[in-house]
Image (cartoon, rainbow, N blue to C red):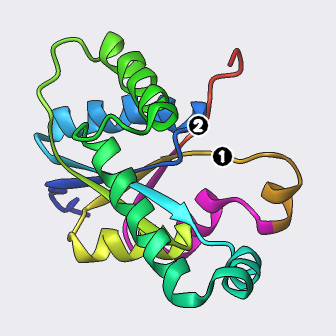
Amino acid sequence: MILPKIEIKKILYATDLSDSARYALAYAVNLADTYKAELIILHVLAEDPTMDANIIGHIGAEKWNEIKKRNEQDARSALIGKKREIPVIQEVLDQFCQNVKDNIGEHNVIMDQTIVEYGNPVEKIISVSQEKNCDMIVMGTHGIGGLAGVLMGSTSKRVLKRSKKPVVIVPLPEDE
């Protein structure tokens, strides 16, 4: 059997800004450097239908959609470093990126696309990987823990199950 040549030109790195996602970024950067691939960063702001219904009852659908859209734009701006008015998000992102920069070394990676989407994380990760014609998805094993994670199931497991693209799921080392 002759093995096909695998070309990896675009890698989608999905992050929820957890420790697991930060650790997975190191793998995404190394893979992108090895394959000279573009690295696309995706952060999904999860929807909560119950919360939406409750808020719409108080302020109306039009106002709520306006607020959600404004927050989506703020998160996108914060992720690409163009907005500094969100101190908590900016501090988390600064720390997230700094921890990775300390370990990147001499890697030369193109990271010119940072995408913030609002919706179901699994749906958005899969749709962005298809829309951007990514060759691979890299993500951590788990972010949100506790009861919510158990009830909803693992995002990474659901992406792995549904994706038609290869998915690299990076577990935290045991000492983390």
Measuring 15% from the left and 57% from the top, which residue is drawn there?
5
Local SS, label 1? loop
The mark nearer the N terminus, 1 or 2, is 2
Image location (x, y in percent) of residue 164: 40, 75
Residue type of the residue flagged with mark 2: Ser
Q: Is residue 168 magenta?
A: yes
Image vertical order of residue 14 relative to residue 21, above or below: below
In the image, 83 versus 24, the foreground residue is: 83
Which residue matches tag 2? 18
Q: Is residue 117 magenta?
A: no
Q: Identify the residue position indicated by label 1 in the image.
A: 142
**Picture coordinates of residue 168 (x, y %)?**
45, 49
> Of residues 133 and 118, which is closer to you in this image?
118
Establish if 111 lies above or below 109: below
Q: Amino acid at mark 1?
A: His
Residue 112 drawn at (x, y percent) = 14, 46
At mark 2, the secondary structure is loop
The reply to whether discs 1 and 2 touch (Cβ–Cβ < 8 Å) is yes
Instruction: Determine if residue 8 is in view.
Output: no
Q: The N terminus lies in which quarter of the figure?
A: bottom left
Q: Which residues are magenta?
A: 152-169
> Quick check: 173 above or below 142?
above
